[in-house]
Amino acid sequence: MEKSYDKRVLLTASDDEVSKGIAYQLAKFGCRLVLVGDERSLRGLAAQLFNSLDGSSKKIQVVNLNFEEENESKFDSAVEQAWSIFGGLDAFVNSYTYEGPMHDCLDISEGEYKKTIRINVMAPWFLLKAVAKRMRDNSDSNPNSLSGWGSIVFLTQILGAERGLYPQSAAFGSSLASVQQLARLSAMELGKHKIRVNAISRGLHLGDNYPSTIGKARAEKLTGDVMPLQRWLDPKNDLSSTVLYLIGDESRYMTGTTIFVDGAQSIVRPRMRSFM
């Protein structure tokens, strides 16, 4: 019998394959979701989940938020709305990131760089603060309750890790590195409030920019010669078990950690470059 996770989760998402895969599996395993992001695209995602999972309509709600917004109060208001839907939140999973086009670092425009920072660095920072403040207040009011524990998970990519460097990803990769450091530093300070913070550094799938840039056919052809598991990431199935673990009670003593779910792509990155 499959384990059920009765967790109230704020999930930042869009209509990308990674967001869809995580949202589907979280809902499938019993989580109540508040999808936060562009309302129009998320309504479509919620409808897809409703059609795929019986009885999911009341467990999946949508809150609109523009991730490029620079006003912190907008993020706080969105979190307040999400918090009130299910009477609180047990977890916050930041799945949405902006990759943008791949460019040599000297060719990235000011506007493109600022957009990357707004979405990938400032938005997670604002959301972390808004969610953690409410989790802190809930924990302080229930000091002896295990239900007071909160979990925050930042989904990043190996492009933000030292061992996963890719060309033409300076802005995107450095923004993700900032989030991985945020997970470590905030974990040090939030533990006293029963809040855990971790990150997942995922591998690339064939829909990501780098495989698309070198050509899908070429990427597929050389996969068996380069990657230990002989395949790219499956965004529908490969990430959700780690997300569920980090928001679940089994990981209650894990915080400040980045877990690599990349099929060892980052380890063999120099070898990949010689092939691709």
Image: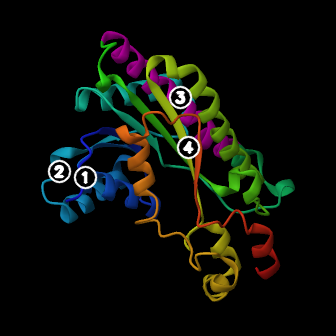
Residue 9 at x, y percent in the picture? 34, 39
Q: Which residue is mark 1?
A: 3
Residue at image coords 63%, 38%: 121
**Across the whole image, how many numbered discs are drawn on residues?**
4
Give the mark, 2 or 1, whose residue is nearer the N terminus. Answer: 1
Give the mark, 4 or 2, whose residue is nearer the N terminus. Answer: 2
Q: Does residue 127 appear in the picture of this structure?
A: no
* SS of the residue under disc 1: loop
Position of residue 191 relative to residue 202, above or below, is above
Residue at image coords 51%, 40%: 67
Whether the residues at callouts 2 and 1 have beta carbons within 8 Å, the answer is no
Give the mark, 2 or 3, whose residue is nearer the N terminus. Answer: 2
Question: In the image shown, does 120 or 154 lie closer to the viewer?
Answer: 154
Position of residue 156 relative to residue 274, above or below, is above
For the residues labelled 2 and 1, the Cα–Cα distance comes to 21 Å
Q: Which residue is mark 2?
A: 57
Q: Is residue 235 left or right of residue 274?
A: left
* SS of the residue under disc 4: strand
Q: Which residue is mark 3?
A: 126
Q: Does residue 15 appear in the picture of this structure?
A: yes
From the image, state whether disc 2 or disc 1 is nearer to you.
1
